Amino acid sequence: MIEKRQFYINGQWVDPATANDFDVIDPATEEACAVISLGSQADTDAAVAAARAAFNGWADTPLEDRVALIRKLGEVYNARREEMAEAMRMEMGAPIDLARTSQWGAGSWHLAGFLEALENFDFEKQMGADRIRKEPIGVCALITPWNWPMNQVALKAIPAMAVGCTMVLKPSEIAPLSSLLFAEMVDEAGFPPGVFNLVNGDGVGVGSQLSAHPDVDMVSFTGSTRAGIAISKAAADTLKRVSLELGGKGANIIFADADEKAVKRGVIHCMQNSGQSCNAPTRMMVERAAYPQALEVARATAEATSVGPTTQSGRHIGPVVSELQFNKIQGLIETGIKEGATLLAGGLGRPEGMNKGYYVRPTVFADVTPDMTIYREEIFGPVLSIIPFDTEDQAIEMANDTVYGLTNYVQTQDDDKRLRVARKVRSGMVETNGISRVQGSPFGGYKQSGNGREGGVWGLEEFCETKAVSGVPMG
């Protein structure tokens, strides 16, 4: 049993003010793999005070010195890859190969991307007789989820550090081990005390305390839309900036002229990370002429998607993160069946031969209609809904028929149509023909998918205030 009860505050590992043990459950075994402590108001106050005391000195630190420390952090992160992968395997159920590549790699990729973005980032520029400055916003509360732990920590902590902010990180209490390891890496890299602090806790406790804290200047949150609304309300009394990356219900619009791998690619993408990605293409919309063939390919692809232990190498998917998540997904699969969707693959219960662990059968529904729950709710599991459409306008209308607007997908070999549809769907990101977005491209959504942008120059600007100074020309 791993014991990680301490918090990282002001450059030191400190005991919690009040003991409040919390078991971290390995979703592959349903057994406790670690114990942490949940913080109290006193712990939150201590971490915020440390960040506040460190802010002026860190903000005044020359950019090249901040960059040097971030580079050192990157070296430490890369050197401790196997430890980080193992932490994420245990805490959130990523199969070890996925943990070593995509899960660990997301942190390394974003760190490198921010260093590149900094090379051309204008902290000051001239506008007529005015000097326009980008200055660090101050003390930032970083509240991160369990599904892509290092992806989200890197997207928040690295740009905040880079522009001169100080911070308090509250990772998800059900997947805290990777963030605790990240704090060790920050310490090893030699950041000044108070620049980076970590307090474990749940949303009702430390999350709410940080959101309402008068000495916190900004909250950057990734998680559910429900929690994002609660954080916004808690932050309103102090009018702090709130940057939100929330849920999604992405449409994958597949026209009849799409490439032959489009359907298979869409199913695999939906199932990746056991379906636990906010930008997953969970609503596959297929042009009527291609619909029968698409159903066959989707069924075969889902049935070929293997589910296996997290310690085993391979391209399989692992469990979902918790019993709560498992039960929610099972309930939505059951609802899909009851509401009349056609079950093509998967269904209720664990995969055959598995009687322990929060493993979900890769599931595909066909003939889904907009009045069905599975069409509208974010399931956050390996569950795909397939819907036919007849015209381009109908596909666009269906794609936009959601409260979310994170990522949509368009598959067609007609470039004019591809761009035309991409312009009309209401989402912060559109991926076309299986081409991933480039490093430094902004990540964020419309509507109830949030209001912030992460990555590259946009991620740096997120943690800055803008100041206009008149009459001081740049030399």
Image (tube, rainbow, N blue to C red):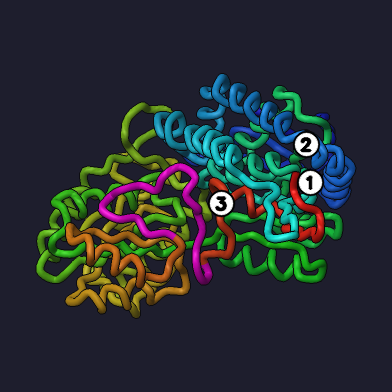
Give the residue pinned by disc 1.
39
Q: Which residue is more in the foreground, 120 or 451?
A: 120
| Pointer 3 or 1: first along the chain | 1
Query: Which amino acid lies under the numbered mark 1 shown in the image of this protein?
Result: Gly
When asked about the image quadrant of residue 167, the answer is: top right
Compared with residue 10, is residue 284 higher up or lower down, i.e. above or below? below
Magenta stretch: dominant SS?
loop
**On the rendered image, what quadrant is the N terminus found in?**
top right
Look at 68% across and 39% down and name the residue there: 162
Where residue 430 sits: x, y (%)?
37, 59
Q: At 18% across and 64% down in the image, what residue appears?
A: 255
Q: Residue type at mark 2: give it.
A: Phe
* Residue 91 shows up from this direction: no
- Residue at 43% x, 36% y is 102
Query: Rounded to the nearest whole Å, what is the CA distance between mark 3 and mark 1?
Result: 27 Å
Which one is in front in this view, the residue at disc 2 or the one at disc 3? 3
The span picked out in magenta is: 429-448
The residue that mark 3 highlights is: 454
Q: Which of 230 and 341 is in front in this view?
A: 230
In the image, taking residue 233 as reference, residue 59 lies left or right, namely right
The reply to whether dot 2 and dot 1 touch (C-beta < 8 Å) is yes
Badge 2 crowding class, 10 Å Cα cut-off, few under 14, some 14 to 19, many 20 or more, is many
For mark 3, give the secondary structure.
loop
Which of marks 3 and 2 precedes in the sequence?
2
- The residue under label 2 is 7
